[in-house]
Image (cartoon, rainbow, N blue to C red):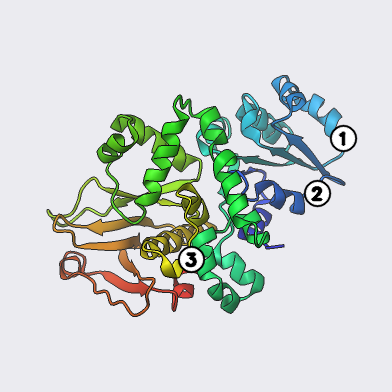
């Protein structure tokens, strides 16, 4: 079993009186993690948001009524909490009126659960985002050298837990994931009336990883207006399927002002959407796959280590560009992603002049641990 970084984060949060929330895409391991840490016996009581009886119970919940159900148990876990109406208010009752109870909850999408929790639980919750297994977690599991040898495999099949633990069945699992689980919350909660258009949009985004994305161009490809495209992408981001990087724009007139790149949190999902699991060494998109892999893994590392920084890419109107830039404590750290370690890259002179307080590094399979650990 792969130990997840979030386990220690949750452990550190248990000493407070706040509710602990895990939010992330389906099948990334939220329930499994909490089942291991708080098994359904002894002092732990589980409620399941998908269960109608649970929904009815919470619709008319009071602290005495809940106490009569859980008895002397000291931990309550609510799985798929976004399925319960007014869940934020119900959890507020527990945190306010039952201070001796440790409260944890999971949710599959931030655009439903976070909206229901934010106001009622202001100052009363820890909100943790969880993703597919990370490079760092696999290094902790079986060592750096083993995971470095697995990089070509990870770039194709990604890090969803069941994919990692089911060698030989990766394609089947990813097909099931992208055919069902991936869309379930978005269709149910996002009010999407044309699901086939969402699939077309995801496929279009999959072909454009590492490139600038134009909502107007996507609208022509998918057959939806640009505003609808933007709203769909916003929902995909809040469902932890994709994330956006905006362009750095400060000191130069020639910098692009309103541009963005869109990446997938998991390479396996990206490749499943375009039905391409060809080996990495014969692909024409291995550079884009490497960029998506490295930057998505960096997002996980930043989240789990509590690093506070702004994240961008950089490009000018004459197409001079840098793959990825972080702004932390007044220092701009610029990175170029090269799958081939022999390929050279230099920091553009215009960037050096505009941002003298900078650092620059090329990230390849030869030094990836410096970037992700």
> In the picture provided, is 79 more to the left or to the right than 207?
right
Q: Residues within 10 Å of mark 1 (few under 14, many from 20)?
A: few
Which of the two residues, 93 or 342, is positioned nearer the viewer here?
A: 342
Q: CA distance from mark 3 to mark 1?
A: 55 Å
- Identify the element where label 1 is drawn: loop
Of the image marks 2 and 1, the number of the one nearer the N terminus:
2
- Identify the element where label 2 is drawn: loop
As drawn, the residue found furthest toward the top would be 60
Which of the two residues, 219 or 119, is positioned nearer the viewer here?
A: 219
Q: CA distance from mark 2 to mark 3?
A: 40 Å
Q: CA distance from mark 2 to mark 1?
A: 16 Å
Kindly identify which numbered label has been placed on residue 71: 1
Kindly identify which numbered label has been placed on residue 39: 2
Q: Residue at x 74, y 23 (%)?
A: 61
User: Label 3 belongs to which residue?
Assistant: 279
Foreground mark, 2 or 1, reads 2
Task: Find residue 299 and report its horizontal and vertical position in percent.
Answer: 46, 57
Task: Find residue 168 and report its horizontal and vertical position in percent.
Answer: 65, 61
């Amino acid at each position: 079993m792969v130990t997840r970084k979030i386990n220690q984060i949750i452990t550190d949060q248990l000493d407070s009186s706040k509710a602990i929330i895990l939010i992330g895409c389906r099948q990334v391991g939220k329930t499994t993690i909490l089942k291991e840490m708080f098994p359904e016996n002894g002092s732990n009581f589980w409620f399941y948001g998908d269960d109608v009886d649970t929904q009815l119970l919470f619709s008319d919940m009071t602290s005495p009524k809940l106490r009569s159900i859980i008895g002397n148990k000291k931990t309550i876990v609510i799985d798929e909490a976004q399925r319960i109406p007014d869940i934020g208010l119900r959890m507020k009752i527990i945190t306010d009126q039952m201070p001796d109870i440790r409260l944890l909850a999971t949710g599959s999408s931030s655009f439903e659960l976070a909206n229901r929790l934010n106001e009622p639980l202001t100052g009363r919750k820890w909100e943790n985002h969880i993703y597919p297994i990370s490079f760092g977690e696999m290094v902790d599991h079986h060592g750096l050298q083993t995971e470095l040898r697995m990089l070509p495999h990870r770039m194709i099949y990604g890090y969803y837990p069941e994919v990692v633990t089911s060698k030989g069945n990766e394609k089947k699992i990813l097909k099931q994931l992208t055919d069902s689980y991936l869309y379930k919350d978005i269709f149910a909660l996002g009010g999407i009336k044309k699901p086939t258009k969402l699939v077309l949009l995801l496929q279009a985004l999959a072909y454009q990883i590492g490139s600038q994305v134009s909502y107007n161009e996507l609208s022509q490809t998918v057959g939806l207006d640009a505003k609808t495209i933007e709203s769909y992408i916003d929902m995909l981001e809040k469902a932890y399927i994709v994330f956006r990087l905006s362009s750095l724009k400060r000191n130069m007139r020639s910098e692009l002002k309103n541009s963005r790149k869109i990446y997938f949190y998991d390479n396996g999902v990206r490749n499943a959407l375009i039905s391409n699991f060809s080996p990495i060494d014969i692909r024409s998109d291995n550079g884009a796959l490497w960029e998506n892999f490295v930057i998505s893994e960096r997002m996980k590392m930043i989240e789990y280590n509590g690093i506070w920084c702004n994240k961008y890419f950089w490009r000018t109107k004459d197409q001079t560009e840098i793959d990825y830039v972080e702004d932390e404590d007044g220092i701009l750290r610029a990175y170029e992603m090269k799958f081939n370690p022999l390929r050279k890259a230099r920091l553009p002179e215009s960037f050096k002049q505009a941002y003298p307080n900078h650092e620059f590094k090329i990230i390849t399979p030869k030094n990836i641990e410096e970037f992700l650990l």
